[in-house]
Image (cartoon, coloured by chain):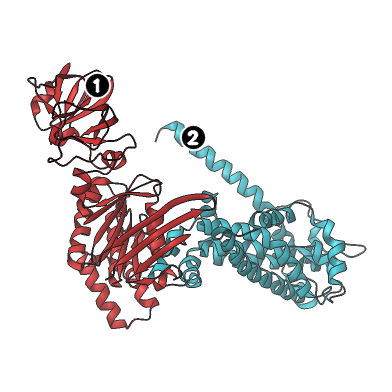
Amino acid sequence: MNSYSTFGTALHRLAILCYVLFALFPLFWLLKVSVTPNDLLYSEGVRMWPSRMSFEHFRFVLAHSAFPVFFRNSMIVAGATAVIVTLLASLSGYALSRFTFRGKYWLVALMLLTQMFPLVMLVAPIFKMLSPLGLTNSLTGLVVVYTAFNIPFATFLMQSFFDGIPRELEEAAKIDGATRFMAFRQIVLPLTLPGIAATLGFVFTAAWSELLFALMLISGNSAATFPVGLLTFVSKFSVDFGQMMAAGVLALVPACLFFLFIQRYLVQGLTAGAVKG
Amino acid sequence: MASIDIRNVRKNFGVVSVLHGVDLSIENGEFVVLVGPSGCGKSTLLRMIAGLEEVTEGEIRIDGMRVNERAPKDRDIAMVFQSYALYPHMNVAENMSYGLRIRKAAREKITAAVSNAARKLELQPLLARRPKALSGGQRQRVAMGRAIVRQPKAFLFDEPLSNLDARLREQMRAEIKKLHRDLGATSIYVTHDQIEAMTLADRIVAMHEGVVQQVGSPLELYDRPANLFVAGFIGSPAMNFLSARYEVGAGTAGARLPDGTLIGLSSGYQLEEGAAVTLGIRPEHVEMSPASESRLRATVDLIEPTGFGIILHLGLHGLPFNVFTLDRAALTAGPTVTVAFPPQHLHLFDETGMRAFETSPQKGKG
C-alpha cells in the first residue's frame, strides 16, 4: 500500500468517524442528562459527563410517573401497526410486482399521491372521521391511522424486494406442483425475509416516534403513547429535563432491541433493495 | 411418458401476436428441439405447454387430454430453466425433493428417488450444499435432477445450457443426450444454438417470427431446407446465397448470375424460365480448384484457421461469400481464388424464398 492510499484511507475513516460522532452526540447527551442529578444539572456548566452519576430519574420515571403506561401503549400501537402493515404490504407489494390488472397504474399513482402532502393537513378531517366511530382517544384509532399512512411506502418497499426475486423460482415451484399461494409462502416469502425485516423496522420506528396524530387524537394519560407522554414532563413553569431524558433513554431500548434482532436481515435487505433500485 | 399434441395454437400479448397458429405432434419418448432466433416464439410455446402462459387460441393435449385450462402443477411435466431457478434457501437434496414433498410422497420414496437421481448425475457429494456454493455446471445438474426425481410425463428444457461456458456446454449436451437415452422420456428442448439442435434432436422444429418453418430430422433440415430462413439458420458457417435467374437450355437447367456466369444445376426445377431465384450453397460444399469450369473468381478478404479446418471469407462480385475447407493449402490462398459449385450440393429457392421443387427426371424440363 503506498502512502497516498494510506492517507486516503485515513481521511475516509476520519470522515466516517466525524459523521458517527455527529449522529451519536444527541444520544450521548440524552444519556448524560438522564444520569445527571438535578442539583448538578444547572450548576456544573457544560461538561461532557457529570461529576456525580445518579439513577434517580430512572427510578422516578419507572415508579412514580405514567411512563410504564405510555411505554405499554406505544408497544401495542407500534407493534400492531408494524405487523399489520407488513402483512398487508407483502400482499399488495406482491400483487404490484407480479400481476397486471386493470387500474394498476392509477392505483400506484393514488398511493404515490397520498405521500405527497403534509400530514398536518389531514389532522382535522381524520379527527372528524374517527370521532363518531369512537376511535379517538383509543389505541385502535391510532393503529388504524398509522396503518393507513404507512401502507403506501411499505408496499413500494416490499414491491422492490419482490421484483428482485426471479419469477422463474415461482414458475419452477408451480411446475413442481405448488399452487400460486404455496409458491408464495414456501419459496418467495422466505427469500423476502430481509425485505420483511426492513419493512417491519421502518414501520415500527415510524409508529413508535409519531407525535402529531397521537397528540391530536389522544387526550389523557390512559391511551397516550410515549412521544405524547414525554410532553407531560413539560409543566407550566419548568421542564423536568432529567426525567424526560431518562424516559427518552428507556424509550430507545425497545427500538434498539428490535433493530438488533432484525439487523442481520436488515443489512442484507437494504443493500438488496438498493441494488435493485 | 406421454405424447404432446399442439393444434393451431396462437398467442397474443395484448395486440402483439407472437405465435400465429402452430401445429405440432410429439410422439411418446421423442426428443424434439425448438430452434430459432430470439423472439421467434419458441420459449413462449414451451411455456404454454408448461402452463406458464395462457393459450390464446388452439389446443394443447398431453397424452390425449386437453390441458389448456390446467394449472402447471396438474400437467405432470418438469422444466429446466435457463437460469436454473434453484431455490436458494434449500440445499441440493431439498431442491430435488421439493416436488415430491409437495405431493406428500412417502419419505422412503423421496429418499430413494433423490439418491437415485443424484447417483445418475454424480451429485451425491453435493446433496447438503446450498445452490450458491455450486458451480454453474453443478447447478445445471441439480436443475436436471429436480426434473427427473418426479418421473414426469415430459421434460421441457428452456435454453438450459446458455449460461455455461463452451466446454461445459458440450459436456452437458452429451449428458442430456445420455439421460434421454436412459430415461426415454418425451422431451421438448428450446435453444437458439443450432449445434445443440442438430446434436440432440430426433426432430427439429425451426421457428421464425411465430411460424413453424420446417419440421424434420436434423439431417433433413440440413440437406433439404424448406426455405431461405432454415437454409440460413441451420449450419455453421452459414449457407451462402447468390441471386440468379433460372434458365433452361437444351436438356440442361442452370442459374444465370448477374455477371452472366451460368451455374449448372443437377436437374430441372418447377420454375418459369427466367424466374428470379436464390442459389444456396454451404461453405463446406464449395470447391476450390484452379481448373474449375465455372471460372468464378473471388477475392480473399480474410482467412480464419479454426484448427480443424479453414474458413475463407471471400468477396464474390462484391458480396461476402464463405468457404470452409480442410485443405491447409488454403491458408496461403490469395489474393484471388477460383471457386466451383458442385451441382448436387446446390439449393434453389424461388422468389418467395421457398425451396424450389426439382422436376422428376422422367419429365425432363420443368
Question: Who's the residue at 19% across and 33% down the image?
Answer: B283
Numbered disc in front, either 1 or 2: 1
Task: Determine the residue positioned at 68% across, 55% down.
Answer: A106
Residue A183 pos. (x, y %): 47, 69
Disc assigned to residue B130: none
Label 1 CA crowd tier, 10 Å (few <14, some 14–19, many 20+): some
User: What residue type is disc 1 on?
Assistant: Gly
Q: Is residue A213 above or below residue A60?
A: above
Cα separation, mark 1 vs mark 2, equals 60 Å
Q: Chain of mark 2?
A: A
What chain does badge 1 belong to? B
- Residue at image mark 1: B315
The quadrant in which residue B225 appears is: top left
Left or right, B60 with reference to A127 = left
Look at the numbered disc 2 and give the secondary structure of its residue.
helix
Q: What colour do you see for chain A?
A: cyan
**Disc 2 marks which amino acid?**
Phe
Q: Provide the letter of the chain coloured red.
A: B
Q: Left or right of A47: which side holds B342?
A: left
Tell me, for residue A7, which label it has, or none. 2
